[in-house]
Image (tube, helix red, strand yellow):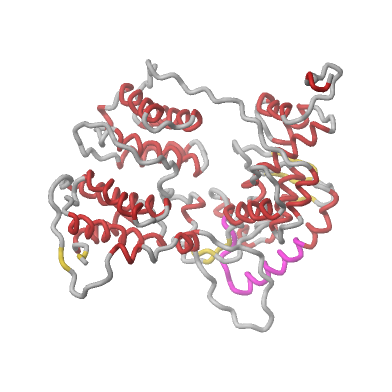
Amino acid sequence: MLAIPTALQLKFDEQLQIRTIPIALHDPYKKWLLYYLDFCRKYQFPPRQEKSLPPFLKKLQDKQQSKIQQAQAAAAITLYYDILRESGKLGTAAPLQPAGPPVSSPSTTIKKMSVAKTSAMQARSETIPSPPAGRPVSTPKTINTSRLLGLPGKVPPEPAVRIAPGPLPAGPETRASWKAEYARLADEIRVRHYSSKTLRTYRGWVKQFQTFTRSKAPAELSTDDVKAFLTFLAVKRKVSATTQNQAFNSLLFFYRHVLCKEFGKVDGVIRAKRKRYIPVVLSREEIDAVLAHMAPPYDLIVKLLYGCGLRLFECLGLRVQCLNYDAGVLTVHDGKGQKDRTVPLPQTILPELRVHLESLKALHRYDLDRGYGGVFLVNALEQKYKNAAKEFIWQWFFPAKHLTLETNTGEYRRYHLHETNVQKAIKQAVSAAQICKRASAHTFRHSFASHLLQENYDIRTIQELLGHSDVRTTMIYTHTVKSVTLKEALSPLDF
């Protein structure tokens, strides 16, 4: 097999760092690049031309590689093309160096890369451990979650927007640099205190737009480019109305606040109209069946999602001080839209909450004995309150199992339970309960609102409990509840 040229490998490693690709994916990315170069040499394809990528992906498909592996390979080769594009070498023949000892061919080696291994690197099994008695302290497993927290100076992971690969329109390649625009975009997002997810989404769409325009100089971008891009998404890639509107809003923000251009009217492209979505709602019996197949602390999370109408990240973001047991009130801080609200605590789970609180106290003492740096705090709160990170009231109510190494300070800190573990536990419980509905973590919030409406709670009260800014958002739950008025419509079969 061929070896990746040293200069290319150094540049590839540099781009992996710049684009904050997870460390666990660095080796797989480089393997896919190596397989691609060997494929081009073996089948006489020009490695520095983008037309060689589709045959390579077709080869992977013939080898029965999974969709995840094909997408990972495409991302790695696209990164290679970007490096060539920046250096002005895209479209020329690439020099390849023969390696010394022979190794197995790509067709046999690729099969060894299973989806389970890739998923295992990304997923984390997180539960609350009980402190071991009389055992020496071991070094905790570490993961770099700075990208998850949106810490200052960190660039969010790429990409947030995934679209099925498709042919790009023909046109000249300008290879203009957009680095200043991406930096300006991050600044404009953060100064408005938008979430890190918003930054990842907007940045993802801007990268899609940059690829579509073939790195056209930002100063030369016009509304016609946006029109062509939105038409391409709707006609060629057949994206949904939600995806099209998300792309439109991302580019609207990019034009107004980054390029400082008036967006103008995009003639010929109609903003996609979203169809009315009826939420999935579980009955109380179905919710009890799901809870019966869940283990701690995931069952307690689901009880709060349903009992308080919380969003998943609102629940995982709870801290010890957010629960007032005496008053029976739970306070949600910095919910969606940076809004706070209070909701009543379910009285039936108060004993479980108190037992869980005692386990948190034991875990906190265990962490302090190991000299950890505390929990992650929002914004500059730790600069204002120097010892807040180690105080018990600021600890996560659903902490992660392992400590996290903060690369800036070298300290081990604790993050909250990862959302993917909760989602996986819910999916497994729904399957085990044999519920024939597409239920997720947000389904319990929908069930909370619908069941309150069934009990004749007024819509304004439900709006306040859910934290909706507009009552029209809450009105969607009127379609999940059967009408019991005298003018209820009947089927002719029931006459």
* Location of residue 263 with respect to 39 vertically, above or below: above
Which residue lies most toward the front here?
493
Quadrant (top left, top right, bottom left, bottom right) of the C terminus: top right
How many marks on residues?
A: 0
Q: Is residue 272 magenta?
A: no
- Residues 478 and 179: in front is 478
Task: State the residue at coordinates (23%, 32%).
Answer: 170
Task: State the residue at coordinates (71%, 38%).
Answer: 281
Residue 54, given in percent of the width and then of the height, sits at 28, 46
Whether residue 119 sits left or right of residue 481 in the image: it is left
Residue 155, given in percent of the width and then of the height, sits at 41, 49
Task: State the residue at coordinates (73%, 55%).
Answer: 300
Residue 231, given in percent of the width and then of the height, sits at 37, 25
Residue 20, quarter of picture: bottom left
Task: State the residue at coordinates (61%, 26%).
Answer: 276
Residue 13, quarter of picture: bottom left
Quadrant (top left, top right, bottom left, bottom right) of the N terminus: bottom left
- Which residue range is magenta in the image? 356-376
- Residues 95 and 385: in front is 95
- Residues 113 and 478: in front is 113
Q: Is residue 359 magenta?
A: yes
Q: Main secondary structure of the magenta part?
A: helix
Residue 228, quarter of picture: top left
Residue 194, given in percent of the width and then of the height, sits at 51, 38
Whether residue 3 sits left or right of residue 265 in the image: it is left
